[in-house]
Image (tube, grey):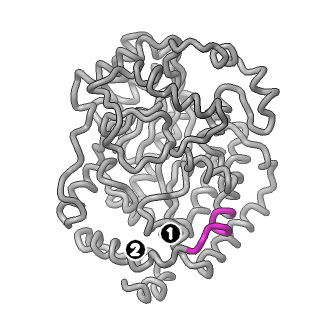
Amino acid sequence: MRINNAGHYEYCRWIETLDRNSGPHIRDMDPKEFFQQHMSPIRQQFLNGIMPGKCTGCAKMEQHGKISGRQRQLLKVGVRVEQFEKTMSSSPWLPVFADRAVDQLPQDWQIELGNYCNSACVFCSPGSSSKLAAEWKRIGFIQDLPPSNWCDDPVLVEKLVATLKQTTHIQYLHFIGGETLITPAFKIILQALIQAGLHHTATIGFTTNISTVPVDIVDLLVQFRGVNIGMSIESFNNVNDYARWPIRLPTILENISKWRDLAQQHNWLLQLRTTPTALTVGSLLTIHDYAWDNNIAVESVNFLDKPACLRPTVLPMQYRQPIINNMKAWIADRPTNSNTIVNLRDPNVAKQQVVQDLQSYVKYLTNSPDESNQLPEMMQYLKRIEAGRGNSILTYLPEYEELFRTAGY
């Protein structure tokens, strides 16, 4: 389950929701009550063969051959979609699934720690970036700043920690922000988990924009059974400076090297995390090159939904097709068995996963409808952002100048 940046519970880390500020809040309800009671109707829908309405994100990923959140969670309990009955019957979790008792607690969490952030990614939202929120308020995109971060309240942090302490053999906790590594609550929660002895069984995951490698946090992480690090980057060329403003690529490259050294020393798992947009999908191969050469997975978590004007499908097909062709050529030069769903946490199949991820973008760019009617909105959006930042997308993507000028840039 997930607790989002505003402190509201959500029944899955991948669900799509229009309003992140509604639903049960940690202030008013224990996590245990939400998991055991409020999630019961969702489980019943699945048992009845009904896909809940908020699960469309996973359905879209599977449609284009991307490993979905649903499939990832199944792999964690030893279940494969293509061999469902056989693998379900052999899953060590079968007794838990078959037991109608509701005393189970979440074994796998996504904990969103608010919007503390030192970057203002062009595709992000105020609820996930304090820097972007301040910018949007200044230029009139929003009137009010997002609500205070739930984890600023020590009472609420202790409420979450108390539930984690009650969970026998907790498996995995993934933290995101904002920028996790500069969020005060991240350190507080890690310290509490160590004090409770949960570091012996729990694996800690977190997503970082690679802007920092704080020594005090590393000193805590080395005490945990395992650590998974998701490093967010859009491209290994300079368009990343535009997409993930104001953090610069040289800083990112320096810090990636530091995290790689730590990962090798402590046997941690590294992944590249990317959110391809119309501005960066053309350089997505730089991500897959790095991942292939360094034998690490690429987790482009889902296909961008919002802001709609930045979706890769806003590019007209004549601009998409060369990207598709380059991706197909890259895949052809790296033959692997990419037909079986692989475990993103298994470094032994990282190269297979990298190819599989890229194949999903070939299908997505080839088969998704043309949304180039959104180009004028994209131009207006970028121009208003650039006015305060003093940059221009044409500096980074001169090959799109005719397209962008025609659309009103």
> What residue occupies the far front of the structure in this picture?
48
Residue at 45% of width from left, 75% of height from top? 374
- Whether 346 is drawn above or below 55: the answer is above
* Residue 368 magenta-highlighted: yes
Q: Residue at x 74, y 37 (%)?
A: 81
Name the secondary structure under disc 1: loop
Q: Tag 1 or tag 2, which sits nearer the N-term?
A: 1
Disc marking residue 378: 2
Which residue is at a point 49% across and 17% down the rendered structure image? 105
Type of amino acid at the residue the image marks with label 2: Met
Foreground pick, 197 / 341: 341
Question: Total number of numbered labels?
Answer: 2
97, 170: nearer the viewer? 97
Question: In the image, 114: left or right of 288?
Answer: left
Asked whether disc 2 touches disc 1, contact meaning CB atoms under 8 Å apart, the reply is yes
Residue type marked 1: Ala
Q: Position of residue 325 (x, y in %)?
A: 70, 72
State yes or no: residue 67 in magenta: no
Q: Residue 148's image quarter?
A: top left
Of 291 and 308, nearer the camera is: 308
Secondary structure mainly formed by the magenta segment: helix
Measured as percent of width and height from the top left, residue 85 is found at 80, 29
Question: Percent x, y for residue 237?
Answer: 49, 65
Residue 293, visible in the rendered structure? no
Q: Which residues are magenta?
A: 363-370
The answer to whether residue 198 is left or right of residue 51 is: left
According to the image, label 1 marks what residue?
Answer: 278
Viewer can see residue 343? yes
Q: Nearer the viewer, residue 269 or 64?
A: 64
Q: Which mark is residue 137?
A: none
In the shown orientation, is residue 140 left or right of residue 328? left
Secondary structure beneath dot 2 equals helix
